[in-house]
Amino acid sequence: MATIKDVALKAGVSIATVSHVINRTRYVSNELEMRVTKAMNELNYNPTDSLRISKKAKTQTIGIITTAIGDELLNDLVQGLDQLLPKEKLYQIVTLLFKGNKLTVKDIKNYQQHYNLDHIIIYDCLINENFDQKFNPKFPIISIGQKQAICHNAFCIDLDYEGGLEKSLKHLIRSGHEEIGIITYHGQQSFNERLRSKTNQLFEQFGLPHKHNLFFEIGKSETEDTYRLFFEDVLKTSKNISSIITMHPNIMIKLLEYANQQQIKIPDDISVVSVGGFITFPLMHPSITHVSIDIADLINCCIGYIEEVNTNQISKISSNLIALESSVSIARGPFGEKAQPPQVLELTSEEVKLLKKSNYSVAVSFHCAGNVWARLHEQGMKDCFNNLGIKMLAVTNAHFDPELQSIQQDGLLSMKPNAIVSIPVDEIKTAESYKRIAESNTKLVLINNVPEGLTQEDYATCISVNEMENGRIAARILGKHMLETGRSNFGMVNHGAAFFATKQRDLTVENTMKNDFPSLNLVAKCQFHNLSNVYDVCREMILQHPEIQSLYVCWEEPAQQVLKALKSLGREDITIVTTDLDYEVALNIARGGNIIGLSAQRPYEQGRAMALAVANTLLGKKIPSFIGVEPYAVTHANLQKAWVDILKEKPPKELTESLSSTQAGNNHVWSHDYEFSEQKK
């Protein structure tokens, strides 16, 4: 009598595929189905007879009872068992669809008797609360996703959903989220109570208030209309909800469908994280942040129970949080206020007409000009001011000298502009100059930092890149690169001045490396106060700590000095991640040099936002005290597009030729993909 294994061999497919054709438990292409059917006919294979006489043939039948037909984790499990179980023991796997509400002892007995099962695996099924604990089957039962064994001769594999929720919550809270919605399936009371308890515990740990009404439950088999109304209610519960965690990837798929229908932008409007993931999540746009189960661990655990080498009644499967594009950090201002997007500054056509009639003027004070960052800020402001009829009286460059900036700003104030846009050289040393502006009739719009002693009433707004996301992107490019290239030790070159923005960015880099890449070691940090001493402080740090293999450098200008220091030491093996894009840094990346990636501000967009903030203020409108512009991740893979998007011009010939050369020759170009795994501790 032919077996399912014989059919699989003749058809040239896996046993799992034959099982799917027989049981209609998963889509199989017409071509494969025809091959399986032909093989069954040629071998006179009757699947029902085969199952019933499997004992005589000494074939061991494993029945997987599930509600999750088509689930990618289940498919991986079936294929893994099929490939790794000992072939000589003639195991065959059948996937059995459970259509009931909650699994009972009677259901299990029926499956076992009808299919003559030797082993039962229960996956993604709710267990009846009145399940008979005294039930003592002669066949072993493996329950995946349960916290405890359901009866005698039963084993459970804990997928650690609470741990997945904890990873997701920590990821979001550390990214600045405070109001986080959690969606799970209802009908699993004890499980959901544990999730609520874990949520409360974590919010208390981080000192945050927790709103209990942000925990939501939905049925597994609801209609599309029910899901639509459900998600509407979720988002109406709190206008400040900034992120959602789904406790099953199928819920995430429904949420993404709803967001697409309602034109909700992820992550611009809301961040999302899934506990449990599909193989397609990293390929979506945006790619979905998710907690991924270690499938190899799960397969080996099941085999251990089937082969009776694992006697532990309870096993726990490890998981990682894969941080992708669907979750972003929320920027915070110097007073802890949540950043608002620059879109809140857009003007109506009537407001533009009014501005053009008003003969307003503005002056700009840069801490340092002459670089790409300042040039694009100035251009963004100039283009916008020209469209609004606002005259730019002067633009000054303090050359990182706080005394010079104070003198320059007094000069600008004497010109009596309607507004001054300024970025402080030093928040402390220039404070008195800013107080004089605040006490005058001139409106003040700040870039990146708020000088010491100023309150939110002293200035119209502060506009910055989202520095938390800026630091997080830089850290993840660095951490992923180090793991992929077998590195373990890194150092940091930080700005030593009292700059809120750079301190927030540097701290975020350090915390992200610590939390997301715990196997990597921060060996040393050095600080500089002027660009002129970057070379010396970096060189000294490397001499004292030659074990350093990679560096974070706070922005692109000091990064160029670091490159010189490394070259002088013959340490061009040390790789660098920095922030902000200019020609020298881009060329280094294009050539496959030390710099392997960066997180870039969008200076033109930030300049435009500053001009719009001035306009709103001159119109007497109250605007948010902190505006955050999202940064841009740049690696060798997207460098050419990033150049156009950020710098608003075609990339120079030397850059494109260098990119083509390294792509063609694969000149030790470092890792490019912007997706990251948060390592388990």
Image (cartoon, rainbow, N blue to C red):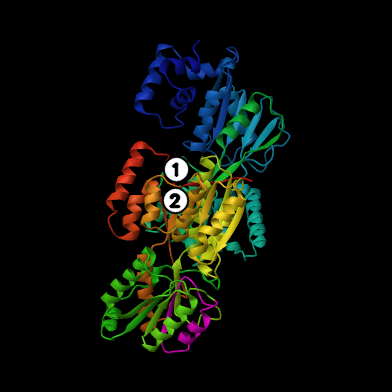
Circles 2 and 1 in contact, beta carbons < 8 Å: yes
Does residue 328 appear in this view? yes
Q: Quick check: 89 left or right of 599? A: right
In the image, residue 321 above or below residue 211: above
Residue at point 36%, 70% (across, down): 607
Does residue 215 appear in this view? no
Of callouts 2 and 1, which one flags the residue occurring earlier in the amino acid sequence?
Answer: 2
Q: Which residue is mark 2?
A: 597
Dot 1: element: loop
Q: Which residues are magenta?
A: 428-451
Counting from the top left corner in percent of width and height, residue 98 is at 53, 35
Q: Residues within 10 Å of mark 1 (few under 14, many from 20)?
A: many
Counting from the top left corner in percent of width and height, residue 206 is at 64, 62
Depth order, front residue of 537/393: 537
At label 2, the amino acid type is: Gly
In the image, residue 435 above or below residue 257: below
In the image, residue 300 above or below residue 221: above
Residue at point 65%, 34% (across, down): 105
At label 1, the amino acid type is: Trp
Q: Which residue is mark 1?
A: 670
